[in-house]
Amino acid sequence: MALRFSSGDVSGFKLLLILAVTYGLIAMLVDSIIHMRFIKPLEIDAPLDRFSEARAVEHVRVLAQEIDGRQEGRPGLREAAQYITAQLEMIKERAGSNFRIEIEETVVNGTFNMMFLGHSISLGYRNHSNIVMRISSEDSQDSDPSVLVNGHFDSPLGSPGAGDCGSCVASMLEIARLIVDSGWIPPRPVLFLFNGAEELFMLGSHGFMKTHKWRDTIGAFINVEASGTGGPDLVCQSGPGSWPSQVYAQSAIYPMAHSAAQDVFPIIPGDTDFRIFSQDYGDIPGLDIIFLLGGYFYHTSFDTMERLLPGSMQARGENLFSIIKAFTKSSKLQITHERESNISTANEYEEGHAVFFDYLTLFMIYYTRKVAMLLHSIPIAIFLAAPVFSKKQTPGLLSWFSTFCDFAKGLIFHATGIFLAIVFPIIFSILRLLFTSHAMHWFAHPYLAYLMFIPCSLVGMLIPRIIWSSFPLSQDAAGLKSLKEVQLRTRREHVIFFFSPKYTWP
């Protein structure tokens, strides 16, 4: 028996083929972007007025390979501090007379309380080292508002810390060199804080905010972090207020930011120095910029220099240099006292975060929360109004009630599908844990994650559709009833015609 397809089947297969090809092309494009294949890292002999990833990687090599461990209590942490100080002194020697460069290594002590994962923690610390570099013009004052760039040079126990956070320190060293060698004299001072105790509940940044003489001059900050070995240098947190994200949207060369990350980050069992500067002890507007790709190497012995994703530090460096320039030129840059007494700044903080996201790192889309309330309400209004205007309704209260019932039933089916699409993968993951000791094996293998979560999610979405076919809407039922009546009428006509006297037998 020959297999025949109707014209509708052929059209359906063509549509599926087009969708598959389109999805494949989009997947290739996105994969290229998140793996930084569109960025060419500059070599070690690149012009001195350009950020060079190769020069930055040399710093990572020393910190992660030549120095044996940068954890509190180990000699490597002291060696790392000496290396950073030596590099900063070399940069200072190369600076012209129109620069004012100050380098300090401070030892911090203190105590404080914090809430972490719902628990109150009391912390006390002694003799942690911070290294601070201040670059400004020769006529700058100590009270001028400044921009802080923060990164930590300690690493977690048992990890070389190439990504977390040797890459951060290396990027900061290269940017400090770039400021001097490019001849760009910042209109406002730029502070580089290399803190030596982030992995121990952010002790280094707390010590800076409680004891350093420049802490009240900070008008904005950029916290550089890594939860992986490269990829999109994502803005995971910003604020208070919308000004920091607006500066990023206007100045980033390779914008990689999504405001939704700010909603997801609080549920992650971790924290960064952003909390100390922006929330607990500073109330300073700033950005939290983090490497995310290669998260399966994070805080492990595999966080080595060889696993740094090429192009990531190049994009980070060019972004940071441009953002620093934008912050130092902004009229909104204020010291602590001015910020606290400025009513407009307080009103901006109350408005909350803006909505922003990048489009394939080409440009940023940015709008305020007030505009978001309007724009995001339009689809909801269209969704609610569509059932009323989609078909011509016969007048009468019964018809409107039928439409409302159909809409409510359809809404329940779709909401149930979305809910089951989330719940089924979670249930499958829990069941999987009962039969395997590799709880996170899928994290490093994307195809396993696809097989684990996508089929379960599709099953959850299809269940309401199956139920829908058993309990059609009133309009669908009316259509089925009309179709059956037409078929029955056609059969009757055939029978009458068959027994008609005018019918001629073959």
Image (cartoon, rainbow, N blue to C red):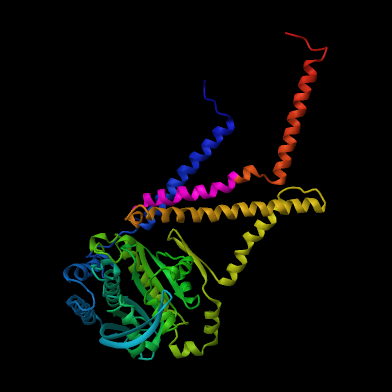
Name the residue at the front extreme: 434
Q: Is residue 73 left or right of residue 479?
A: left
| Number of marks in the rendered image | 0
Give the x, y percent position of residue 326: 42, 75
Relative horizontal placement of residue 273, taking residue 396 as reference (left or right):
left
Residue 38 or residue 355, whichever sits in front: 355
**In front: 407, or 360?**
407
State the image quarter where residue 499 is shown: top right
On the question of residue 161 being in view, the answer is: yes
In the image, residue 193 sits, relative to residue 159, either above or below, namely: below
Q: Is residue 413 above or below residue 70?
A: above
Question: Residue 149 location, x and y as percent?
Answer: 35, 77
Image coordinates for residue 212, horizontal then vertical, percent:
33, 89
20 with respect to 403 (left or right) = left
Q: Main secondary structure of the magenta part?
A: helix
The stretch in magenta equals 445-466
| Residue 58 placement: quadrant | bottom left
Q: Is residue 455 magenta?
A: yes
Judged from this view, the residue extending furthest toward the top is 506
- Asked whether residue 252 is in view, the answer is no
Residue 193 vertical placement versus 407 (above, below): below
x and y percent of residue 83 in the render? Answer: 19, 77
Q: Nearer the viewer, residue 148 or 184?
A: 148
Q: Residue at x 61, y 51 (%)?
A: 413
Residue at 50%, 77% in the rendered image: 241
Q: Residue at the spot x=45%, y=56% of the render?
A: 426
Image quadrant where residue 362 sits: bottom left
Is 68 included in the stretch rendered in magenta?
no
Rendered-image quadrant of the C terminus: top right
